[in-house]
Amino acid sequence: MDIRTKSVHTGVNKDSSFNSVITPIYPTSTFYFEAIGKNKGFDYTRSGNPTRQALEQNIAAIEGGVGCSVTATGMAAITAVMFYLKPGDHIVTGDDIYGGTYRLFNAVLRPMGFDFSFINMRDHKAVKEAIGPKTKMIWIETPSNPLLNIIDIESITKLAKSKNCLTVVDNTFLSPYFQAPLEFGVDIVVHSTTKYINGHSDVVGGAIIYANQQLEERGRYLVNALGVSEAPYDAWLVLRGVKTLTYRMEAHQANALKVAQFLEGHKNVKKVYYPGLKSHPQQALIKKQMKGFGGMLSFELNTKKVDLNAFYKKLKYFALAESLGGVESLIESPWFMSHVSMGEAGLKASGITPETVRVSVGIEAAEDLIEDLGQALKG
Ligand SMILES: *Cc1c(COP(=O)(O)O)cnc(C)c1O
């Protein structure tokens, strides 16, 4: 079955009471038993709920996993995955990962005794050297946020397997439509479904997708034990959103490419980061592991020519906001907003500057977006 069909049909036809075409919301905390030990597969909503299960089946299918747990937020998914480990374990990850992930790793888990190496994961040798006897997990985010650096999923996963480390990929930026990490041997994929999978900026959520049953069993146990599963109402909204994921991704990508090309040719823009541009330095890797370029791009604004706040103020269609992946275009400064928790040293090390502008390109008409950016870039 094609992913466009899976995203519409998997987990969806569930109502045998009244034949509703759409999966009902089951807003119940608990389920009654017909006798001791006899129920219809659900007993308590923290552990399981039919609406949530429908979404889990859908996301497992489109990501190509054996199963999925959906969680209250993307960070809830990431938190649950870190509980596969214990204090004393060492994790290797990138130096330009999502700011909230960095905060959880560096400011919450590190003081609890977890050890992290934040490195440039494009450098295979650096990854190899960072792995020691206590390393238990390699955490990959690709393309990275906000600079769209690409990390070689297959070669790092091979290396991790030879060292008995779990590999986890945060696949939020490309969505299952443009990247399938499990095909490269990855153990676990996580998503912030807040972004492209839901796609309408009206709910927060997360997902954990498992490569095998053993991982799934432990993952489900953890999500229930930690109490981070997604509410049925929220799961229902995400299930509505995911059905149009594939078509939205095509539209995001077509627009992002046009916007990136426009920005690259503008005199007040110093540099554009977008995997769909020929100027992106990692062409071979992009071709090997990505099925598309996605809808995120960043650029360096010449703030000597264009005042940053005036630029944001002039924009009509790009709301100055964190987050990404919704149908409407958003714009922001990672240095001052989304990535602040990295601290100045961390920001500098990863190549983010006060002039870096991140854009989540929406599905509006590309001509309108370009016209809007053009008038704001005049300075
Ligand atoms: C937003 C985001 C998260 C966190 O997800 P929330 O739903 O905001 O908790 C994690 N990783 C990436 C790449 C993200 O963009």
Image: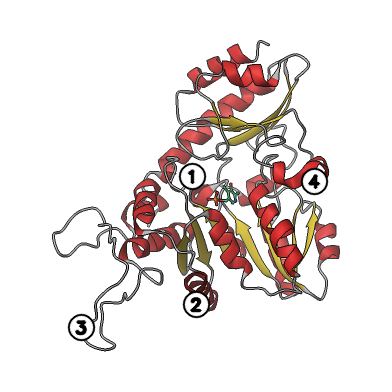
The answer as to whether callout 3 falls within 8 Å of ligand 1 is: no
Residue at far left of view: 18
Q: Residue drawn 54% across and 60% down?
A: 76
Residues under labels 2 and 3: Cα distance?
26 Å
Circle on res. 281: none
CB within 8 Å, label 3 to label 4: no
From the viewer's side, name the closer residue of 128 and 104: 104
Q: Quadrant of the N terminus?
A: bottom left
Q: Quadrant of residue 14?
A: bottom left
Determine whether label 2 and label 3 are within 8 Å by CB.
Answer: no
Give the secondary structure at mark 3. loop
Classify mark 4: residues with Cα within 10 Å, few (<14), some (14-19) or many (20+). some
Q: Is residue 71 left or right of residue 377?
A: left
Residue 357 visible: yes
Say which amino acid is labelled 1: Tyr
**Which class describes the residues within 10 Å of circle 2: few (<14), some (14-19), or many (20+)?**
few
Q: Which residue is mark 1?
A: 196
Amino acid type at image mark 4: Gly
Q: CA distance from mark 3 to mark 1?
A: 40 Å
- Marks 1 and 2: in contact by CB < 8 Å? no
- The residue wearing badge 3 is 34
- Specify the label residue 217 is tagged with: 2
How far across and how far down the image is residue 377, in percent? 65, 15
The type of residue carrying mark 2 is Glu
> In this rendering, which labeled residue sits more in front, label 2 or label 4?
4
Residue 306 is left or right of residue 238, and the answer is right
Q: Give the percent coordinates (x, y) of residue 45.
A: 36, 68
First-in-chain label (1 vs 4): 1
Label 2 or label 3, whichever lies nearer to me, is 3
Q: Secondary structure at mark 4?
A: helix
The residue closer to the viewer here, 370 or 108, is 108
Q: Residue at x 47, y 72 (%)?
A: 224
